[in-house]
Image: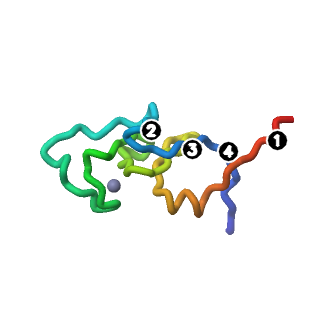
């Protein structure tokens, strides 16, 4: 059987340390804080994490935090591919 995911309107917030989100905590700066992320190559001290239903999610600088029934974190390139902005006409 072929199916299609039902569309849903969700909240999205682009995350940086200087643009915090209540569901994302900065990573504790420890011995590995100066190490580079294997995913984005920025220092780990510039990262955060969120906890969703599927566990702990790494939040790289510039990632998008998506809030629907669950919280998820996706890279900017994936966000641009998968989401369109909902423009409300105000009527
Ligand atoms: Zn990263």
Residue 40 in the image: state x and y as whole percent. 34, 60
Q: Few, some or many C-alpha atoms within 10 Å of disc 3 (few <14, some 14-19, many ≥20)?
A: some
Viewer-proximal residue among 54 and 78: 78
| Front position in the image: 41 or 83 | 41
From the image, state whether disc 3 or disc 2 is nearer to you: 2
Name the residue rendered at 33%, 61% in the picture: 39
Please give the count of numbered marks on the rendered protein. Answer: 4
Q: As drawn, which residue projects farthest toward the front?
A: 18
Q: CA distance from mark 4 to mark 3?
A: 10 Å
**Callout 1: 10 Å neighbours few (<14), some, many (20+)?**
few
Q: Residue at x 50, y 46 (%)?
A: 14
Q: Secondary structure at mark 1?
A: loop
Task: Say which residue label 3 marks.
Answer: 12
Q: Earlier in the sequence, mark 1 or mark 4?
A: 4
Q: Which residue is mark 2?
A: 19
Give me the disc on residue 46: none
User: Dot 2 lies on which element?
Assistant: loop
Residue identified by numbered label 1:
89
The residues bearing labels 4 and 2 have C-alpha atoms spaced at a distance of 22 Å
Residue 54, percent from left and from top: 42, 46
Image quadrant holding the C terminus, namely top right
Residue at image point 37% right, 44% down? 55
| Ligand 1 is within 8 Å of the C-beta of the residue at disc 2 | no
**Residue position for label 4:** 9
Query: Which residue is at the front of the view, 62 or 83?
Result: 62
Any atom of ligand 1 within 8 Å of the CB at mark 3? Answer: no
Q: Is residue 68 above or below residue 60?
A: above
CA gap, disc 3 and disc 1: 19 Å
Q: Secondary structure at mark 4?
A: loop
Task: Check disc 3 and report its element: helix, strand or loop.
Answer: strand
Q: CA distance from mark 1 to mark 4?
A: 15 Å
Q: Judge left or right: residue 16 versus residue 77.
A: left
């Amino acid at each position: 059987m072929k199916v299609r995911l039902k569309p849903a309107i969700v909240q999205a917030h682009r995350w940086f340390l200087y643009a915090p989100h209540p569901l994302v905590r900065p990573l504790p700066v420890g011995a590995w804080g100066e190490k580079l992320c294997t995913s984005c190559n920025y220092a780990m001290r510039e990262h955060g994490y969120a906890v969703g239903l599927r566990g702990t999610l790494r939040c790289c600088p510039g990632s998008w935090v998506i809030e629907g029934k669950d919280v998820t974190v996706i890279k900017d390139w994936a966000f641009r591919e998968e989401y369109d902005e909902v423009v409300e006409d105000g009527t």
